[in-house]
Every structure is written in structure tokens, then in C-alpha cells.
Image: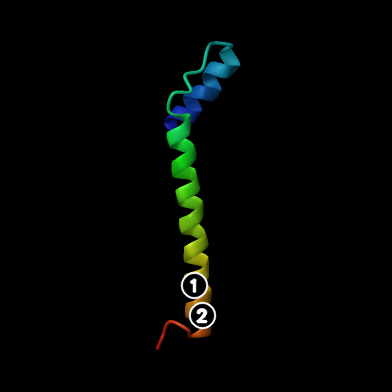
Amino acid sequence: MISLIKWRIAQKKGSAIDIGRARLFARISHIEALLIMLIVIAASGMARGFLAG
């Protein structure tokens, strides 16, 4: 998150942005999105009693 804030500050100043870690940040973001979807699916399953046995 701090890197993204630094990118915004650098962009406002007009200086060059180091995008070397952008691919890593994108991968982490996709993994987080997948985990959130799994949490929602698990929560709806538990609310309906599918995972209770």
C-alpha cells in the first residue's frame, strides 16, 4: 500500500515511477479477490446450513 501511495506522489510531482513490483502487486490483488469470493461462498453456505453437517 505504501508503494502505491509513493507512486501517486511521484506521479503528481511528474517524476518517473518505478513499476518493477507492479506484477507482484497485481498477483497479490488477484489472490485477495479470490479469497474474498471464497469467503462469501463459504459464508452463504454456512448461512444455509450446508457446511453444518
Which disc number belongs to residue 43? 1
Question: In 3D space, how far apart are the residues under numbered discs 2 and 1 (Cα atoms)?
Answer: 6 Å
Q: What colour scheme does the image use?
A: rainbow
Where does the image place residue 18, in percent across and percent down from the top left?
47, 19
Where does the image place residue 42, in percent across and percent down from the top left?
47, 71
Residue 28 placement: quadrant: top left
Q: What residue sits 50% from the left and 78% below the top?
A: 45
Q: Would you place residue 41 above or below residue 35 in this image?
A: below
Which residue is nearer to you in this view: 13 or 42?
42
Q: Would you place residue 18 above or below residue 46 in this image?
A: above
Q: Would you place residue 28 above or below residue 53 in this image?
A: above
Q: Would you place residue 3 above or below residue 32 in this image?
A: above
Q: How many marks?
A: 2
Quadrant for the N terminus, please.
top left
Quadrant for the C terminus, please.
bottom left
Q: What residue sits 48% from the left and 30% below the top?
A: 22
Residue type, label 2: Ala
Which disc number belongs to residue 21? none
Task: Classify mark 1: helix, strand or loop.
Answer: helix
Residue on which disc 2 sits: 47
Which residue is situated farthest in the bottom direction here?
A: 53
Where does the image place residue 47, in percent across and percent down from the top left?
51, 80
> Residues at badges 2 and 1 in contact (C-beta under 8 Å)?
yes
Where does the image place residue 5, in percent across and percent down from the top left?
49, 28
Which residue is nearer to you in this view: 15 or 53?
53
Task: Classify mark 2: helix, strand or loop.
Answer: helix
